[in-house]
Image (spheres, rainbow, N blue to C red):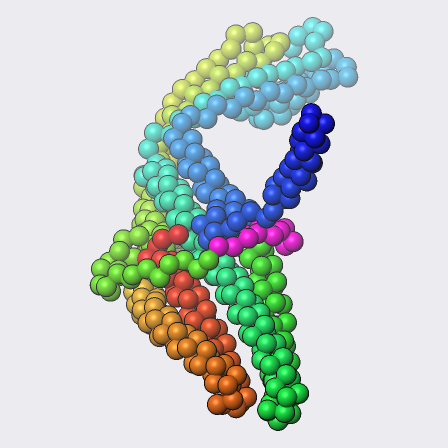
Amino acid sequence: MKHICTIVLAVLVFALGTTCPAVADSPPELTADRAVEIAMENSLSRKLATADVDMAQDRVGQALSAFGPVVTLDGGIYRYDDQPSLVQLEEGLVQLNNALSALTSGQISTLDMPDDSRTYYGMAVELTQPVYTGGRLTAVKKMAEAGRDSARHDLKTADQDLALAVKKAYFTVLLTRQMTRALDDAVASMVIHVNEAEAYHLMETVPRLDVLRAREKLADLKQQQLLATNNFALARTALNFTMGVDLSTRYTFGGQPPLGSLPGSLDALVQEALARRPELAAMDAKIRMAEDQVALARSGHLPTVALVGSAHKFEPENQDPSAEIGLVASLKLYDHGMVSHSVALARHELQKAKTARTQIERGIRLKVEQAFRNAQAARESVQVAQSSLVTAKETLEAARTRYQVGLSTSLERLDAEVSLTRARTNHIRALSMYNISVSELERALGKE
């Protein structure tokens, strides 16, 4: 008894060990939402849009840094082969200190020539702090912030476009899979009819023409079956490409989503879209950028003031470092109309941005109405196709019974088979088109 229990236990362990890996290796189930998540993780176009957001954020930091001081350190060295003359020394020091912006030739000429030094070096530190720029720095900062907001909304737009593309590819896979199954059922049913016709022909109850018609229809359905199988494989590959995964990746797919209800108010949907669509928000940011560009162009008419301080030291002559501080103001008196034309150009760009926003708003209204009406029509089409499918099933069942008892011809039976196959494919297409229409409506509303 003990040996029998050991053998049974070993068999169970072996069975579990051989079946568990098969379960672990089974393809994961993929839903539409999960497909969108995978695409968001792998999309190269989304990575490019994300990089644009990061770059825009750095531009904001760059604009903010212009408000702070700038400290510059310069240094230089001058070496003579021999003891220089006073003229050589003066020329060399002028060359050195021109680079440092520290000493002048007049100052150097008063220096006494050292006895044995041939190396002269110096160092200068300069600090510049903008005090007033006529609003230029503020305009640049606001432009950078508006550009960052625009990049963020563009990223959201890219996400919504990617989600729509993935959903379309996903529902296309469901469509082709259901088509394949429908044609598999049609082929199986036609094989039964061919066998029945051949059997009845052997009993001389039906003519050979019935057999030939059935075989011809079976061959036609097999051709459609091969095409549907190929379309299913291509649809899976296209979905993998859209999600950014390896093209050979395999998933299992659930059934069609339920046929939900649609919102009834078109005006409410339009208002929701105008409030949610990232394209409008991105255009608003571009309008702000254009307004700031006008302010930036106007700053060319205004003066600029900066606080400047510097300190320098020169060896071996200048043992004590010197320092200075002051305000530097600059005002452009005449530029032959350059600033005025810059302001006019910026105003034209602002008007173009406002016109573009109006155009985008009109396009959104049109897209929402088109998507809404398409979704309504698709939903009604599903209901009609469902009713037609029920009728086709009942017709085929009646035709089969009548054919088996000799009350109808093979042609009537074949017509019923064809009608059922057509009704199934129409129902599958209607469901898929409805799901795609709903996805397009969600995209038109600014949803992912």
Q: Name the residue: 63% across, 67% down.
A: 230
**Frontmost residue, 43 versus 416:** 416
**Frontmost residue, 79 versus 371:** 371
Count of labels shown?
0
**Residue 253 falls inside the magenta stretch:** yes
Residue 174 on image: x %, y %:
50, 61
Q: Is 80 on the left-hand or right-hand side of 36?
A: right
Quarter of the picture containing the N terminus is top right
Residue 191 on image: x %, y %:
61, 76
Residue 136 drawn above or below residue 406: above
Residue 4 on image: x %, y %:
70, 30
**Frontmost residue, 277 versus 107:** 277
Q: Name the residue: 60% across, 16% down.
A: 122
Q: Name the residue: 41% across, 37% down.
A: 60
**Frontmost residue, 393 versus 40:** 393
Magenta stretch, residue numbers? 243-254
Whether residue 444 can be seen here: no
Task: Please tell me in which quadrant of the rendered image residue 145 appears.
Answer: top left
Task: Please tell me in which quadrant of the rendered image residue 195 appears.
Answer: bottom right
Whether residue 312 can be seen here: yes
Q: Is 164 on the left-hand or right-hand side of 290?
A: right
Q: Name the residue: 42% across, 25% down.
A: 69
**Residue 236 falls inside the magenta stretch:** no
Residue 379 on image: x %, y %:
34, 68
Q: Main secondary structure of the magenta part?
A: loop
